[in-house]
Structure formats: structure tokens, C-alpha cells
């Protein structure tokens, strides 16, 4: 309804997501630490989908250039998975 309510809602949602992510990170480390090492961070990223390595293809329309794909990532000391 107003900016203050929106800020309160956003902060509550952000806090809940952060707590859930930390719990998931602890659970994942219990299960995976012996296989891939300790996970430092987990979360979602977006990347442009399709096209050439430079992100463009000669046959792509402007709509196709704006498509994004969500990917789940995990970061260890040595790699981004």
C-alpha cells in the first residue's frame, strides 16, 4: 500500500530467504563435503541463453537476445559449479 509497508515486506522476505539458504548450505555440506569439498556459497544466477560465445548470433532477433535462463550455482574454494 505504501513505501514503508513495501520495505517491511521486502526485508522480511529477504531475511527468510537468507535463513533458508544458510540451512540448505549446511545440509548440502553435510552430504557433499567428502565428495566436492566445502561449499562456500549457493544460490541462483541468471545468464543469457543461446547464441554464440560472445552472446550474439547473426540469426537472433532482439527478443531472443533478451532471454535469460536461471541456473543454480555452488561455489567451493576451487570452482564454480
Image: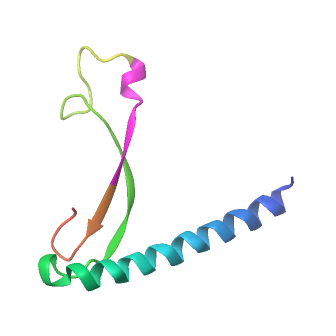
- Give the farthest residue toward the right: 1
Q: Nearer the viewer, residue 2 or 54?
A: 2
Asked if residue 76 is positioned above or below residue 7 in the image, the reply reads below
Asked if residue 79 is positioned above or below residue 68 in the image, the reply reads below
Quadrant, the C terminus: bottom left
Name the residue rendered at 19%, 29% in the picture.
Answer: 52
Name the residue rendered at 76%, 67% in the picture.
Answer: 8
Relative image position of residue 24 (x, y in whole percent)? 40, 76
- Give the farthest residue toward the front: 31
Q: Is residue 57 left or right of residue 18?
A: left
Asked if residue 31 is positioned above or below residue 8 in the image, the reply reads below
Q: Where is residue 21, by image quadrant?
A: bottom left
Q: Which segment is the magenta one?
A: 62-71
Name the residue rendered at 42%, 29% in the picture.
Answer: 66
Q: Is residue 53 left or right of residue 8?
A: left
Q: Nearer the viewer, residue 77 or 54?
A: 77
Amino acid at each position: 500500500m505504501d513505501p514503508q509497508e513495501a520495505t517491511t515486506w521486502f526485508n522480511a522476505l529477504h531475511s527468510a530467504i537468507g535463513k533458508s539458504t544458510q540451512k540448505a548450505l549446511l545440509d548440502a555440506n553435510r552430504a557433499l563435503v567428502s565428495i566436492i569439498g566445502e561449499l562456500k556459497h549457493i544460490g541462483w544466477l541468471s545468464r543469457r541463453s543461446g547464441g554464440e560465445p560472445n552472446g550474439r548470433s547473426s540469426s537472433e532477433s532482439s527478443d531472443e537476445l533478451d532471454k535469460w535462463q536461471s541456473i543454480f550455482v555452488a561455489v567451493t574454494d576451487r570452482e564454480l559449479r
